[in-house]
Amino acid sequence: MEINSQTNATNPVQITDDGKTVAIISYLSIIGWIIAYVMYGSNKTQLGAYHLRQTIALFVTGIITWMVQMFLIFIPVIGWIIGILLIFVYLFLFILWLFGFIAAINGQEKPMPVIGKKAQKWFKGIN
């Protein structure tokens, strides 16, 4: 009995991730987002664009929150109290990041709560 095992060397198997790598890398940091955006330029996928929009909205929201906190910290007492309360906003942003990151790992286009659907409208230029 002979087992026929032929390999096709002329057509190697090409593995694609359908944008999953771009989606995951975009959540790692702002530098990760830039790297993911560059990668997306050579392999445009719907999943990659979706998560690029989600993460840029998350980063912009975080930066705006930080700017508000830096402004309020100079107002005696009330500014400090509001600044401390903004820590809960950062915790909420982390939870949003976690939701988005898990969706990217699973290859899903699930919007983050609160800002996810708006992110798709705000940054529709990333397509």
Image (cartoon, helix red, strand yellow):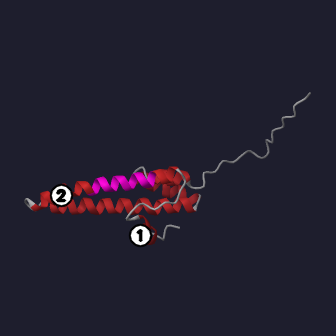
Magenta region: which residues?
89-101
User: Would residue 93 be counted in the magenta stretch?
Assistant: yes
Q: Distance between the residues labelled 2 and 1?
A: 25 Å
Quarter of the image holding residue 76?
A: bottom left
Q: Mark 2: which amino acid?
A: Gly
Residue in the foreground of this view, choosing between 82 and 127: 82
Q: Which mark identifies residue 118?
A: 1
Q: Is residue 72 left or right of residue 57?
A: left
Please name the residue shown 36% across and 53% down the image.
95
Q: Using the rendered image of the protein, determine whether residue 4 is visible from the camera's viewpoint.
A: yes
- Label placed on residue 4: none
Which residue is the extreme one toward the left? 76
Residue 10's x, y, as percent? 79, 45
Give the image location of residue 123, x and y in percent. 44, 69
- Secondary structure category for the residue under label 2: helix
User: Could you say which disc has been placed on residue 83 in the image?
Assistant: 2
Q: Is residue 122 magenta?
A: no
Residue at far top of view: 1
- The residue lying at 27 percent from left, 61 percent from top is 65
**Residue 107 location in percent, x, y?**
55, 53
The residue under the point 49% across, 67% down is 126
Q: Identify the residue at the far right of this view.
A: 1
Q: In this view, does 76 lie to the left or right of 68?
A: left
Q: What is the x, y in percent for residue 58?
A: 37, 60
Q: Contact (CB < 8 A) between labels 2 and 1?
A: no
Q: Which of 40 and 52 is in front in this view?
A: 52
Q: Which amino acid does label 1 sit on?
A: Lys
